[in-house]
């Protein structure tokens, strides 16, 4: 499969909905938290592979604004496990070329969690490799609503005319305002929905769904998704002339 990948046509920005950790654990008669732990280790491996093959942006759905509704023990694990993982591997994170950013709400995190986010962003801000964006307490409705409020405030304060508002205006108020367009959206575990993730950004992205559960989504599965992407006819609303 690697031989079929054109390294000169690698998408610049891909996103992944990391789905299937709980089902992976259930199939093995293990607690759901074990699946989340396996999924975290897999994210590290996939990020490294994306960095190696030249992908510039990898944006992943880690914890949604709706995930707070999950059982409290699971939420507690998801809000504390990253702290332990970070303490264990932060030296490797700091010495890599990968830049890490976190987007989403920040008003519901503990101080320790916020301190971790601030430190990892600060320590990796000058890294020149893959930009790995972790979407935590993120929801696209919330992101777009926040953008609309910011634009409305600019209009109210006389800094923006209503007739000057364009789609670019909205794009430039999103959490991803400095990112290139999203090329490819991947969802694991066999679910065929977007689940309130990057709804504005994915307007012209290609969608790839796989039955593979996230902890089993390895390098070969990533390459398979990228080859599938490279075989698509991307028209962006127009027509492609195949006669040339």
Image (cartoon, rainbow, N blue to C red):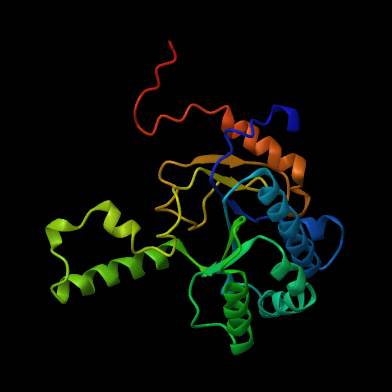
Residue pictured at 61% horizontal, 41% vertical: 209
Q: Which percent across, then down, holds residue 95? A: 72, 67
The one nearer the camera, 231 or 92, is 92
Above or below, 131 against 1 in this view is below
Residue pictured at 67% horizontal, 31% vertical: 5
| Residue 11 visible in the current orientation | yes
Q: Which percent across, then down, holds residue 161? A: 13, 64
Left or right? Give the position of 104 relative to 85: left
Residue pictured at 29% horizontal, 66% vertical: 148
The one nearer the camera, 66 or 118, is 118
Query: Number of numbered discs present?
Result: 0
Which quarter of the figure is the C terminus placed in? top left
Which quadrant holds residue 204? top left
Above or below, 159 against 24 in this view is below
| Residue 1 visible in the current orientation | no
Left or right? Give the position of 150 relative to 208: left
Which quarter of the figure is the N terminus placed in? top right
In this view, the residue farthest toward the top is 243
Q: Which percent across, then down, holds residue 184? A: 54, 43
Q: Which percent across, then down, holds residue 117? A: 59, 77
Which quadrant holds residue 223? top right
Which quadrant holds residue 45? bottom right
Above or below, 60 against 92 in this view is above
In this view, the residue farthest toward the right is 29
């Amino acid at each position: 499969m690697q031989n079929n990948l054109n390294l000169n046509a690698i998408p610049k920005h891909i996103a992944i909905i990391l789905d299937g950790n709980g089902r992976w654990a259930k199939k093995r008669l293990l607690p759901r938290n074990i699946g989340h732990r396996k999924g975290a280790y897999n994210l590290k491996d996939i990020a490294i592979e994306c960095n190696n093959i030249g992908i510039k942006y990898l944006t992943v759905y880690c914890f949604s604004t709706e995930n707070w509704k999950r059982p409290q023990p699971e939420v507690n694990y998801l809000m504390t496990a990253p702290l332990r993982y970070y303490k264990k591997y932060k030296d490797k994170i700091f010495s890599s070329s990968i830049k890490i950013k976190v987007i989403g709400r920040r008003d519901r995190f503990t101080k320790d969690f916020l301190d971790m986010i601030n430190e990892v962003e600060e320590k990796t801000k000058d890294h020149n490799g893959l930009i790995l964006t972790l979407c935590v307490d993120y929801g696209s409705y919330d992101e777009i609503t926040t953008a609309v409020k910011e634009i409305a405030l600019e209009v109210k304060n006389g800094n923006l005319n209503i007739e000057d508002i364009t789609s670019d205006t909205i794009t430039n108020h999103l959490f991803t305002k400095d990112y290139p367009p999203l090329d490819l959206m991947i969802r694991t575990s066999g679910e065929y929905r977007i689940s309130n993730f990057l709804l504005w950004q994915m307007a012209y992205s290609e969608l790839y769904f796989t039955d593979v559960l996230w902890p089993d989504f390895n390098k070969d599965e990533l390459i398979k998704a990228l080859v599938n992407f490279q075989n698509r006819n991307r028209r962006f609303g127009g027509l492609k002339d195949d006669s040339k």
